Amino acid sequence: MRPLQVLLCDDEKGMLLVMRKIVERAEGFAVVGEATDGKEAVELFAKHRPDVVFLDVDMPGLSGVECARIMVDIDPQACLIFATAHEQYMKDAFAVYAFDYLVKPYPVERVLETLERVRRLRMDREQEDLQIAERRQMGLSKLLVRHKDGVSLVDMADIIMAQREERSTVLYTAQERIVTSEPLSDLMERLDPRLFFRCHKSYIINLSMVYRIYPYGRWTYVVKLKNTTQDALITYEKFGEMEQFFSGIAQD
């Protein structure tokens, strides 16, 4: 397994040095960048797409919580760890899916324990992904969806649509609404391309559930789907692709 990449963000250079030395002691991690203000933190995050970010709350430019909100939108899979002297921001930190909240001064062992949990979680996730790939090769049609309450196994055929909502991805079936941090692009890679279609940057639809499409403005259409009151949008270009897809099926 490749080393997990770590971004360190703190306005105190002495603390950055301490954090770097701690990370270098941990197995399976490598520091890829250091930021002393919020703007730089976001820029380095977008550039390196690190697996783990240590965030101070009180930084110039953007606070740690503000940075976290932007980072989660860029990559919901990133592991955000707050390391700060301000205990009162804990609730805000966990509202943006923080993995942990370390209050200064914290023991070195406390940080190492957190990093070990991150490493084991990543190993477990990679093992799950391998098992999912094996099941797909065997023809199983279940989709494993991770969310804040654990995981759900969903029959692909039951998924009506998926869409981005408030920095999360939401899957709709006739029975339930499942919220996950997985980006739509990653979800699309795990769905059956014979059944699912990325019709818009914010929507994936089950083609078997489409029953009506009508114009919505000049370059967009509304897609009506069975078994849900939710509508999807499809762009003009994607509408053309879908027409070709269904024309090909009709000719076959």
Image: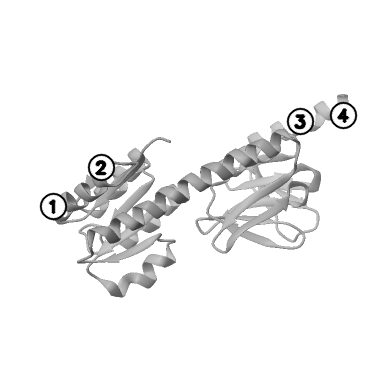
x then y, percent, for residue 182: 54, 49
Judged by depth in the image, the label closer to the viewer, 1 or 4, is 1
Q: Mark 3: which secondary structure?
A: helix
> Which of the pair 5/47 is nearer the observer?
5
Q: Would you call the spot at circle 1 few (<14 residues within 10 Å), some (14-19), or many (20 or more)?
A: few
Name the disc covering residue 245, or none.
Answer: 3
Residue at the location (33% across, 60% down)? 66
> Residue at label 2?
33
> Which of the pair 211/24 is nearer the observer?
24
Q: Quadrant where the N terminus lies? A: top left
Q: Would you call the spot at circle 2 few (<14 residues within 10 Å), some (14-19), or many (20 or more)?
A: some
Q: CA distance from mark 4 to mark 2?
A: 54 Å
In the picture, measured across the screen, residue 239 lies left or right of residue 102, that is right
Judged by depth in the image, the label closer to the viewer, 3 or 2, is 2
> Residue at label 4?
250
N-term mark: 1 or 2: 1
Task: Confirm or deny contact between disc 3 and disc 2 (CB under 8 A).
Answer: no
N-term mark: 3 or 4: 3
Residue 65 visible to an observer of this rendering:
yes
Please name the amino acid that badge 2 sits on.
Gly
Judged by depth in the image, the label closer to the viewer, 3 or 1, is 1
Residue 211 visible to an observer of this rendering:
no
> Which of the pair 167/83 is nearer the observer?
83
x then y, percent, for residue 168: 53, 56
Residue at the location (70% across, 58% down)? 230
Q: Would you call the spot at circle 4 few (<14 residues within 10 Å), some (14-19), or many (20 or more)?
A: few
